[in-house]
Amino acid sequence: MQSTAISISPSIPLIKSRQNPNYSHSHLLSLPSRPSIYSNSRRLTVVNSCVDNGNSSFNLSRKSSGIDGLIPLPSSLKFSGKKSENDFVVKATSVPESADAGDAPETPAIGRTLELGILFGLWYLFNIYFNIYNKQVLKVYHYPVTVTVVQFAVGSVLVILMWIFNLYKKPKVSAGQLAAILPLAIVHTLGNLFTNMSLGKVAVSFTHTIKAMEPFFSVLLSAAFLGETPTPSVVLCLLPIVGGVALASVTEASFNWSGFWSAMASNLTNQSRNVLSKKVMVKKEESIDNITLFSIITLMSFVLLAPVTVFMEGVKFTPTYMEAAGLNVQQVYVRSLLAGLCFHAYQQVSYMILQKVSPVTHSVGNCVKRVVVITSSVLFFKTPVSPINALGTGIALAGVFLYSRVKSIKAKPKAA
């Protein structure tokens, strides 16, 4: 996938002393080296925006680009020392090369590993509980649009509280940035809506097996709209993904076409974000970090979906309606709230991880997450799985892992 690349190449400032006959050359050499007091301003050299073939991003300001299957940003920032003829080059002429290393000590490797381990654990845990609570609600309450808007409502309340209590700085977003984010919010809304529609029709494990086909849609849309021709190695990785999903579908006990096509539509809309992130790039000096971006998209998704929910399903989340339908009101409300909290939490943690690791590492982690979710849902809901069905799921997930490795090998020369 393509992404905007930004390179920072700090240059060593040349500190020139004034010619004064009262000072000798040897005396000047004895002065300690430090940045000039006149070097507060920095020169910004903009050449152009560059694209590479890495995975797409759902972020305006993180340090690497590319993510497979996860929410992408309109424009990503990729830091590298290598220049190309279209690079977006930022030169800080007043900062010496050793400034970053000397100003702030790096976090110990053990501390970084422990932090990442905790974040990955929370990512998987929140995702597992979201799928469990969400499925429990959808099994008895057959209104996926309402369920989805409730999840966006819970996330919106959390975002507003976060800004009110200064847990995270409230952003100042321009009208141009909002216009660029709007298409991403639309496909984000549709992607989650179609996922809930699928979860309401088929088993959790089957929905996530179908969603393993996201790389296929990513390659297909990139070739159709961005003119990216996939390499033979990428095409070979897609074969086990498609074949594995087909084998799992044929042997799936809960299979129905409504659930199948809803999951496929979710793949299509989720990967459309990658294309939109390149068609609608925000080329501004102000950048939006991915936590802020996710918060804005959550609010926009709620605003977009709320009127659609009333039009399509009416107002059917009231205690009166649920009692009349014979539902346990407290149970539905509590599980819907927990599903909404886990939904917002796992996506926010995912973006936090994305700030700390490469896109390929995140993609591999997403593949492992899908294995964990499928396994946990099968065990919790006691979903019947035949050996052939398990084989098909395994083949599809192995293809996703190989796809991530191929993208990793492809990305290494660009990172050099």
Image (cartoon, rainbow, N blue to C red):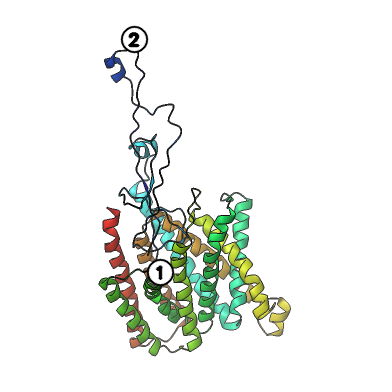
Q: Residues within 10 Å of mark 2 (few under 14, many from 20)?
A: few
In this rendering, is residue 346 above or below 210?
above
Q: Horizontal placement of 102 versus 302: left or right?
A: left
Q: Residues within 10 Å of mark 1 (few under 14, many from 20)?
A: some
Q: Which residue is mark 1?
A: 369
Q: Secondary structure at mark 1?
A: helix
Q: Horizontal placement of 299 versus 83: left or right?
A: right
Hey, which quadrant is residue 208 in on the image? bottom left
Q: Position of residue 337 (x, y in %)?
A: 60, 69
Q: Position of residue 259 (x, y in %)?
A: 49, 84
In this rendering, is residue 79 above or below 361?
above
Callout 1 amino acid? Lys
Residue at image coords 39%, 48%: 47
Q: Position of residue 18 (x, y in %)?
A: 36, 18
Residue at image coords 41%, 46%: 46
Q: Horizontal placement of 210 versus 395: left or right?
A: right
30 and 19: which one is in front? 19
Q: CA distance from mark 2 to mark 1?
A: 70 Å
Q: Position of residue 303 (x, y in %)?
A: 63, 66
Q: Which residue is mark 2?
A: 22
